[in-house]
Structures are given as structure tokens and as C-alpha cells.
Image (cartoon, helix red, strand yellow):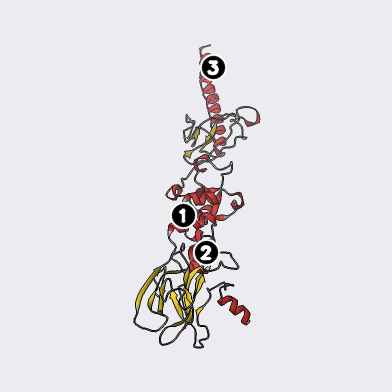
């Protein structure tokens, strides 16, 4: 770094992206100390002791972490400054040492020049940054120099990108999770889908650009061929919904019913006559038919045997048939033929005795 640039930075004319200018006597050559809050957290409290100049400083972070003390363990007057996002700045006077900090120590203008420093926004993202640590030099008596590290608060990072590495280190609660997922539904949202408000899911899945996302499979409209009885239970007919999708709360404890769908046309004239071999008989178990009628009644009457099955409901062509197989048609024809032969035989039997009696009498 050039000497000119260093002077501009130290004078507060140019801000380094990740820290504020170092205040105090920067001619000190001992190694620099640096203490930072955990990633995503910022300073909530600055405290220390002063006796004329600032003797030592330590900071507490928003997660409760208290960083190591910077400066000698000298006695003096204790001071505390609470800061937050709204009043996130540092001020004091810059002289031979750290003369004043937040109004404590030597009077602002007695030995140095007053200053107020704030963190600059992140260069690459434009996110606001906050005081998040300290750095500088100290000797055996006092602080020689002091500056502050800068970084974004985790809320400002995670609200737009829950997949940022910083967010993986934060215990994000359900309320914040829903706020972030409402803006940008990411893998973390999907992994914690059962913690999301359904309004967040509905908003995301109703967006046409997300219509093919497997996560939204349960928000698919049922095709026409899906029976009415399960059209509203998407998890019963859409495997993507059942396996990978977000299942709405009202469907989670809803079981998928077994249904039987049977409709069969019976012709009563022409080539589709019930007495011909052109009858198509469908075998159906008991159940309900959404298109009308009940499947499972009986075909009345028995002619030399029982024709299993049922007739129920009606359609424009003549009704519904269920139960027996096509072989029943052959049985029916056989029985009718048998009855006709039986009637003929009985007629012959009755007729012949009367004819013999007539001959004998004659």
C-alpha cells in the first residue's frame, strides 16, 4: 500500500471496506492485535478503563461473546458504551495515543483531533456493515492505536440468501426462516419445509415459473381422468407429491381410499344383443362408481344355475354390468336350449299315449 493511500485511510478520507481507520500513534512497531466477533455477529457493547488516555478496551458481541481485552490491565475509570444497528459508530479524539473514546478520557480537543467513524457498505454486495471487532497496538501503559473491524449482520445476509456460509453458523428461528423463504425459497427452506407457513408455500408454488418444481407437485391440478373421489388428494395420485413435494397440512393425515371404477355398456338389439356372444361382461369388485349407480346387485332369477355378478346404475346405452365372465353367456344359451328340448320331449311323451289309447278304442 502506498504511503499516500495509507495517509488518506488513516485521515478518514478513504475507508477500507472491512474496517475503520486506525486512530492514535501509528508509528508504533509492535505486532498488531486483532479481535473479531463470530461470523454474522456485531458489537453490542464497548467498555474499558481510562486515566487521561484510554488504557484498555474490550467488546461484547450480539451473541454474547466477550472478546479479549486490548491494552494493559491498568487501573482507571471504567466506561461502557452500548451500541446497536441504529447508533453504530465510534468517535473520540486522535492524538499521540487514543486520547478519547465515546467522550471518555482526555477532552476531545485537548491533545488530538475529534473524529467519528462508521463502517462503509460492502463493496461487492452493497450490504450495510457494522462494527464487529477491534484491532490496533498497545504498550505497557496504554492503547497506542485503535480501529474497528466491519462486517454485515447475519440478518442482512440471510434474509436474501439462506445458503450463505454465515447462515449455516446461525441458529435461525422459525419466524426469520419464514421471512427469508418468503423472499427467496432456497434449499434450506425445502429442508425445513414443515416449519414454513403455508402462505409462503402457496405464494411460491402459484408462481408460474415454479410450476415444474417437484417441491410444488402437491399444488398440481388433477387431470380429467382422475376420479372425483381423489382429485383433491393429490398425494394419492401424484407420486412426485407424495415423495418429494410439500404436502399441505390438511392432506397429511388424509388416507388414500381404495376405489373401484366399473362401467360397461350392454346392447339390447342388433349384434350387441344380450342373447348373443357379443356381450362384453366386465368383472368388478364391490365399490362405488362415480359415474352413477351401484355395482354389486344381482341378476335376478336362476335358470339351471346362478349367474354371478351385479347390475346397477344406468347409462345412455343401457346400464352397467358387473360380476360374471363371458362364459356365463354360453351357460345361459345352453340352459335355454335345454329347456326347449325338455318341453319338446314332454310334449311328445304326452302326445304318444293318447294316440295309442285312440287306436285301442277303435
Q: Secondary structure at mark 3?
A: helix
Q: Is residue 5 visible?
A: yes
User: 30 or 76, which is in the foreground?
Assistant: 76
Residue at the image point whose x is 60% and y is 67% from the top: 124
Q: In x, y percent, where is residue 285?
A: 48, 41
Lower sequence index among marks 2 and 1 = 2
**Which image quadrant: the N terminus?**
bottom right
The mark closer to the camera, 3 or 1, is 1
Q: Is residue 163 above or below residue 57?
A: above
Q: Is the residue under label 3 in contact with that under label 2 (CB below 8 Å)?
A: no
Q: Is residue 197 above or below residue 167?
A: above
Q: Is residue 291 above or below residue 13?
A: above
User: 324 or 52, which is in the foreground?
Assistant: 52
Badge 1: residue crowd in 10 Å (few <14, some 14–19, many ≥20): some
Name the residue at the right extreme: 271
Circle number at residue 333: none
Q: Is residue 39 visible?
A: no
Lower sequence index among marks 2 and 3 = 2
Residue identified by numbered label 3: 355
Badge 2: residue crowd in 10 Å (few <14, some 14–19, many ≥20): many
- For the residues labelled 2 and 3, the Cα–Cα distance comes to 115 Å
Residue identified by numbered label 1: 196
Circle number at residue 157: 2
User: 329 or 54, which is in the foreground?
Assistant: 54
Q: In x, y percent, where is residue 182?
A: 51, 54
Residue at the image point whose x is 39% and y is 79% from the top: 52
Lower sequence index among marks 3 and 1 = 1
- For the residues labelled 2 and 1, the Cα–Cα distance comes to 20 Å
The mark closer to the camera, 2 or 3, is 2
Q: In x, y percent, where is residue 39?
A: 48, 71
Q: Secondary structure at mark 1?
A: loop
- For the residues labelled 3 and 1, the Cα–Cα distance comes to 98 Å
Amino acid at each position: 500500500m502506498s504511503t499516500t493511500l495509507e495517509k488518506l485511510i488513516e485521515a478518514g478520507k478513504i475507508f477500507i471496506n472491512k474496517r475503520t481507520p486506525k486512530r492514535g500513534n501509528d508509528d508504533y512497531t509492535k505486532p498488531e492485535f486483532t479481535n473479531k466477533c463470530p461470523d454474522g455477529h456485531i458489537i453490542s457493547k464497548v467498555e474499558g478503563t481510562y486515566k487521561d488516555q484510554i488504557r484498555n478496551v474490550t467488546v461484547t458481541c450480539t451473541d454474547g461473546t466477550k472478546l479479549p481485552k486490548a491494552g494493559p490491565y491498568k487501573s482507571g475509570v471504567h466506561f461502557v458504551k452500548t451500541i446497536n444497528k441504529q447508533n453504530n459508530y465510534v468517535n473520540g479524539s486522535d492524538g499521540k495515543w487514543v486520547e478519547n473514546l465515546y467522550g471518555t478520557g482526555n477532552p476531545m480537543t485537548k491533545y488530538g483531533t475529534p473524529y467519528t467513524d462508521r463502517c462503509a457498505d460492502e463493496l461487492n454486495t452493497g450490504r450495510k456493515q457494522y462494527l464487529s471487532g477491534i484491532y490496533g497496538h498497545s504498550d505497557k501503559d496504554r492503547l497506542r492505536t485503535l480501529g474497528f473491524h466491519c462486517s454485515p449482520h447475519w440478518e442482512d445476509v440471510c434474509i436474501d440468501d439462506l445458503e450463505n456460509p454465515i447462515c449455516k453458523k446461525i441458529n435461525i428461528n422459525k419466524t426469520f426462516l419464514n421471512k427469508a423463504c418468503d423472499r427467496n425459497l432456497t434449499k434450506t427452506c425445502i429442508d425445513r419445509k414443515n416449519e414454513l407457513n403455508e402462505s409462503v408455500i402457496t405464494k411460491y408454488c402459484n408462481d408460474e415459473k415454479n410450476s415444474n418444481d417437484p417441491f410444488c407437485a402437491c399444488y398440481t391440478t388433477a387431470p380429467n381422468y382422475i376420479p372425483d373421489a381423489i382429485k383433491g388428494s393429490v398425494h394419492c395420485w401424484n407420486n412426485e407429491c407424495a415423495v418429494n413435494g410439500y404436502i399441505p397440512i390438511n392432506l397429511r393425515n388424509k388416507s388414500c381410499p381404495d376405489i373401484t371404477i366399473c362401467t360397461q355398456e350392454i346392447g339390447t338389439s342388433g349384434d350387441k344383443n344380450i342373447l348373443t356372444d357379443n356381450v362384453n361382461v366386465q368383472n368388478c369388485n364391490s365399490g362405488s362408481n362415480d359415474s352413477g349407480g351401484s355395482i354389486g346387485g344381482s341378476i335376478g332369477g336362476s335358470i339351471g344355475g346362478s349367474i354371478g355378478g351385479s347390475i346397477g346404475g344406468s347409462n345412455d346405452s343401457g346400464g352397467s354390468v358387473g360380476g360374471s365372465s363371458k362364459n356365463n353367456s354360453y351357460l345361459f344359451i345352453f340352459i335355454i336350449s335345454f329347456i326347449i328340448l325338455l318341453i319338446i320331449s314332454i310334449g311328445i311323451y304326452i302326445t304318444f299315449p293318447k294316440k295309442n289309447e285312440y287306436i285301442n278304442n277303435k
